[in-house]
Amino acid sequence: MKTIVIDIETLPAVDAEIFAELIEITAPSNYKDEAKIQAYIEEKRLTAVQDINKESALNPLYGRVLCICTDDGKEKKLFMGETEAETLINFESYLNDEPFRLITYNGRDFDIRYLDMRFRLNGFESPFREQHIKAFDDAYHIDLYGKITNFGKVKGTYLKHDLKTVSNFMGFASNLEPLDGSSVLPLFLNGELDKIAAYCHEDVARTRLIAEKLGYLREWI
């Protein structure tokens, strides 16, 4: 059985500007100058476009998978097709060549559930089973974020638990310029797919480092 460390990058699949046009925006009542009123409305609509793009990329109903990166200890792979359907089909073929277990960082709440839904919305059978998604079941999926935070019970105001913070604390050294999920859409629109792939691969490497530090990969050998 292969153990796969996985991370995904996603994009909005809706036209945020069309959605933003449907939002009723009015200026405060003390705005009397027409130019200032229009400037206010345009600024708020631009903010709405940005927010809709961010929210839809994180929502499997309104977003789509751009790429999937994996590391199974033998090879590191990138799945990024011309279409989302091609990406998902190629990924499914890779998964189904032998039984698999997953290691993710917040994958139960995001990556795996997102992928599961996108498979279904594309009309495909999901390759994931209940044991890959069900909370507290470590037999086929270890979600490191759940382990680090005791399934959300450990919280912090100043001490964060995001992937970058935790992996940096454990000694991960990055050679890439600082990026986060909000960088994916601008990079995509600029055609910088190589940067997105590198960012996704790095998140897999960060996840693997945490798994190694905590001993979960040893337990699954």
Image (spheres, rainbow, N blue to C red):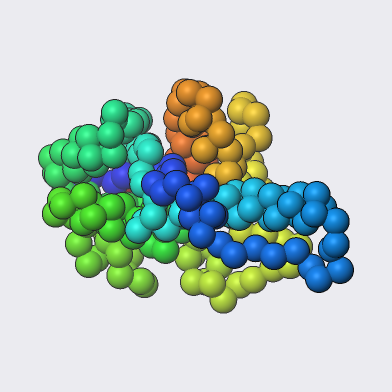
* In this view, 99 is above or below 140: above
Can you see residue 28? yes
> Could you tell me how many numbered marks the image carries?
0
Can you see residue 7? no
Residue 190 rendering spot, x and y as whole percentages? 53, 25
Residue 20 rendering spot, x and y as whole percentages? 54, 55
Residue 14 rendering spot, x and y as whole percentages? 41, 49
Kindly identify the residue that appears in the image at 21 percent across and 50 percent down: 122
In this view of the protein, which residue sits in the foreground, 84 or 166?
Answer: 84
Kindly identify the residue that appears in the image at 30 percent across and 70 percent down: 134
In this view of the protein, which residue sits in the foreground, 195 or 30?
Answer: 30
Residue extending farthest to the bottom is 153
Kindly identify the residue that appears in the image at 23 percent across and 55 percent down: 121
Residue 30 rendering spot, x and y as whole percentages? 86, 68
Say whether residue 217 is left or right of residue 213.
left
* In this view, 95 is above or below 119: above
Kindly identify the residue that appears in the image at 65 percent across and 63 percent down: 25
Say whether residue 110 is left or right of residue 83.
right
Say whether residue 114 is left or right of residue 181.
left
